[in-house]
Each structure stands twice: as structure tokens, then as C-alpha cells.
Image: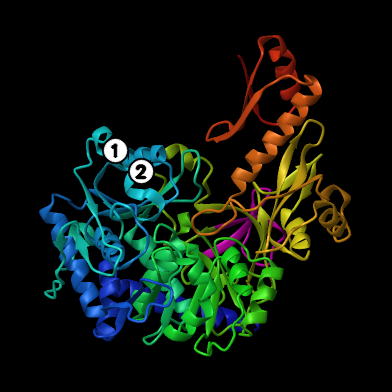
Amino acid sequence: MAIHDVKVERAALDARARAILDECPDVFRLIARGAAIDPEHEAIVYLRTALDPAPAVTTARSFLGFVSAAGRWLRENGVGPDDTVSILAPNCTAVSVAYWSAMSFATVHPLNLLFSREAIAAQLAAARTKVLFTPPPGAPGGLVEKVEGVAEAIPTLKRIVTLPLDGRVAFGDETVTPDFARRDPSPATSSPDRVVAILPTGGTTGAPKAARLTNRNVTASAVASMLAFDGRPGDRVLIALPLFHVGGAFVGALSALAAGAAQVVPTAASLRNPEVIKNFWRIVEAQRITIGALVPTALGAVAEVPVGGADISSLRLFATGASVCPPEIERRFLAAWPGDCVRQVYGMTEFAGAITQTPHDFGQKPGSVGFPVALAEVAVLTGGELHRGPSPTGEIVARGPHVFSGYADSRHGRGAFHDGWLRSGDLGRIGADGEVYVTGRIKDVIIRGGHNIDPAGIEDAALGFPGVALAAAVGRPDPYSGETPMLFVSPSHGASIDPAALGHFVEGRIMETPARPRAIVVIPEMPLTPVGKIFKPRLREIAAEEAAREMIAAAAPGVATDVFVATEIERGLVVTVKAPLAHCETLRAELGKLPLTANVIAT
């Protein structure tokens, strides 16, 4: 499409978005807008099992009534506009009601389901949580067990309330009855600038960041995605991401609610349920899914499932996000679903969702992540200079009403902005028509002796090897080069991988000698975030531990040591070694050559 056409289309898109946001300045009114299109349409279709023959269906009218009733329940239980409601529970009907009600009448604080007990307690204390929602005892993941007794250490926490996972809406022993009187939020809660959500930005270890999002941020994000997807009444949108992720909450669920579309929730465990993966195409057929969305790792898993005789003709658009989809994964998926293409969504929590998407009526430019979403601006920062048109490769920055109001912990905000532009930490460029290309992550770039290596090139090469399901390359600390590439791979179901054969295969496809991995490790399961994104911080810790053990073995052969590696906010990678006193000085000197913090403790 010509650049002139792109500009004309973009101006019209921005105008539509502004009109909707003027009409709906807060989350509750945006949900009400979608419900008014057809009050009797299915707002949530909750599958209790992968092939549930009679899913729990909630109409738009009932859902809005549930949200209003839940808001009244919050007020009656002492929760005001400035209070925080935390949710530690998987996606289901009751969780959805609690989530959007808390956002409409208080501040919602959804917790990463993989957080440790210690991390959960720290987050609850930092958020000054007043009410915590959890699933019933015995639910998968031991979520209730993680918070047993936690209230004793958190003075603000007044109640822990269970939510059923069976499609009913109840708060503890109290059944919630829809309030059809439409009790709108008060002016205090409907202000566009009010903080309505505190969302973790990713990760499962260390001290997680938490972004503060306002009504304006959330509604701008949902409307932008709704317009990019061309969300409409009659659509049936697969909601496979959890609500503590902006992709699941705002790009997916809220954009569907605003459009008057149905959300189809494939069990509480979603894509972590093997039966959902196994029966994925049958679910698409049975539920007549029109818009699908999966993270690249899940996309790869689904690509291995035969379509068989399933009728998947209802699908008109499939999106992927959370990380850039490797071309090999896209190729495998398109072999199963020969649709138009896989639409890449690029975003971040601090932007309340998508920064770029390819509009539904545009062709996806190969390798790109689409165009800036409605009301968003994107530029590239190189050497302190901003490029807002076609650009060289640099750091992607963005601005717009979607940009968050800061982190809950202000220490995390250092360097987050450049002259009012949100810094993404991602490397990329802007193409001739304004499309955006993501080429890597600044922190993911492996710097070997001053040579910048994009891990994507290594990973793409490895994914072409038979039996490789997932691949991730990280920098392994090195005393001479700073870092050397280390490749981690996990096998497809039933496959085995010979590291030596894989190494030979990869070397033949990587032209730059410095980019060839020094070490290859086959691991049964790749560490993933709860949304299915490869969790590279953990791989860096493994790589650092291996580097430290190798140096220890060379400096003090046969000496028994304990080695631990962790990632800290202030110091980054920290390796702690416990060793006999006689060897401590030697090990301190050796480990001091690595580009990390080393603590050597005498045993």
C-alpha cells in the first residue's frame, strides 16, 4: 500500500478512536458500549473442559449486571476508589467479573500465577491490597496454599475471597446476582486519569516491576486493538492469555467486550491444559472462532496438531504477540491454517497493550510487526536522535494516551523515557511506509568482544533443525570476550536432539563466526513466563552458573563448592560461591574476571 494511502487510513483510524474515547472515558462505559449493541449476545463462553458440550454462557446484559453488582459488593465491604483489589486466580467467568468490577470501582492488581509465596506477599504489601480473590482450595497450582497466613503480615488486607472455577459467579459463599439497574461509576472512579490497574510487567523471579495504568491508558489500548482487528458483533474471540497480561486483558478481552463480540475462554488452565492443545482445532470448529491469538511458543505447539477434518473456515484473523514470532514457527502454523497470514502484535505492559498491529485490511509486510496502532506514535532513537520516518536501526520509542503513569516502585522508572517518549528496550527500524520492524532486544543483544550479535539469527537457524521445538540464545559470561553465544533448545514431543549434529547444522547457517554458539544445551522444558514467552533471565542465570563452574574447576580442581546465581535489580547477575577458606582469594580473583558480581563466602 502506498504511503499516501497509509496516512489517509491512519487519519481515519485516529478519528474513530477519538470519537469512541470521548464517548467512553472509562473502562465501565467502554464495556457498557459493547453490551448495548446487543444485550443478549454471548459476552463470555467459558469451557470448563476442552470439549465442554454445554459451556457456561453469560450474555452481555448479564455480564454488565454482574460487574455492577460486584461493584456494589466492593463498596459494602469497605473497598473505595483508592483501594486495591488483588486477584490470584486463572481466567474464568467469576474472575472476569471480579477483574472488570475492581477496575471500574477500585484498582485491580492481578498477580502472576507463578509468583512465589514471598513475591506474592511483597506485591500485596506494596499495593496495599484490601481484598484478595483466589480460587477455591485444591485448585491447580496451589494458589490458595501460597497465600495461607499471608494476611497476618499485611495490615491492609481485610479479606481473602474465593471465586468458583465452574462458570458460576460468586464471592465466597455469596452468590452474585446481576444488577440490571446499571449503577455507573461515580465521577471519582470515572476520571480518565485515575489509576485503575497495577500490572506486573513480566518475569517470575526477583522483584517484579508493576506498571500503573489509568482509565485513559486502558481504554485507548482496547479501542486501538478493536479497530485493528475490526472487532465486530458476531465475532468470537479466543482468549488464551491470562488477565494479568495486557495481551489477554486489553488487546483481547476488553477489545472484544467493547466490540460487542464473544470471548471464548478455553478452560481455566487455557493453553497450559494439554487437552486444549490436543483439541485446539476442534475447539475452533465447535466454537466457530473468528479471531485467534496465541504467543509464538503456543503457536508452535498448535502447529504440530493435525487439523484433521475440523472445519476451521470461521477463522478470519490470527494474531501472535508477547515476543516476535520466528519465521519458522509461522511457516509451521500456516501449514496447518492456510489463512492470510499470522498478524504480529507488538507491545508492552507500559503501553497498556499493543504499540503496533497490522490493520485487518492491510497485508502483513514480511518481517514487520505492523503499523502504530490508533493514536500511537512510534520513532527510533539512535545516538540521541529521533527518527519518525524511515529510519536506521535503533531503539524503538513510543508515545500516546496509552503510555502508563509510572511504576509502583519508582526505582524501576530510571531511564524509562526520552524526552517524553517511552523507551521500549527493543531494537528496530521504521520502513518506507511507516511499518515497524523489531530486530532484537537491547538486553538480549550478545556483545562478544565488541561485536553485537542478534540472538534471533542463532535461534532461527536452530529452529530449522528437525526435532527442535523452541530455541533461545543468550550471552554466556566470558573473561576475555565479555560474552559468547550459548544456545538452549528443547525438543518436540517424542524427538531427541544430538547437540553435536545441531551444532554442525547451525554453524553451516550462521555466516558470522562470532555468532556461532560456543555451547549448546538441550533442556527438556524451556523456562517460560505464564503467557508462554521464553524467560531469558533464567537462561542467563544458567549460562552464568556454567561459566562460573568452569572457571572454578580450572582454578581449584577437585575443590567442593556450592554455586548459586540470581538476578538482582541493582546489581544484575550475581554469582554466590561457597568454598573452603583456603581457596576463597583465588576464586575471588578468577571470578572477578567475569562481567558480573561475584560473592565468595568461606565455608
- Quick check: 310 above or below 178? below
> Which quadrant of the structure image shows residue 151?
top left
Which amino acid is tagged 1? Val
**Residue nearer the viewer, 157 or 304:** 304
**Residue nearer the viewer, 496 or 271:** 496
Q: Give the range drawn in magenta.
A: 376-397
Which amino acid is tagged 2? Lys
- Quick check: 442 above or below 602? below
Do tag 2 and tag 1 residues touch (Cβ < 8 Å)?
yes
Is 198 contained in the magenta span?
no
Q: Which residue is drawn at 80% across and 52% down?
A: 499
Q: Mark 2 points at which residue?
A: 146
Is 393 contained in the magenta span?
yes
User: Quick check: can you spot residue 373?
Assistant: no
Q: Which residue is drawn at 37% across and 63% down?
A: 91
Q: Which residue is drawn at 65% across and 49% down?
A: 442
> Which labelled disc corresponds to residue 150?
1
> Which quadrant of the structure image shows residue 580?
top right
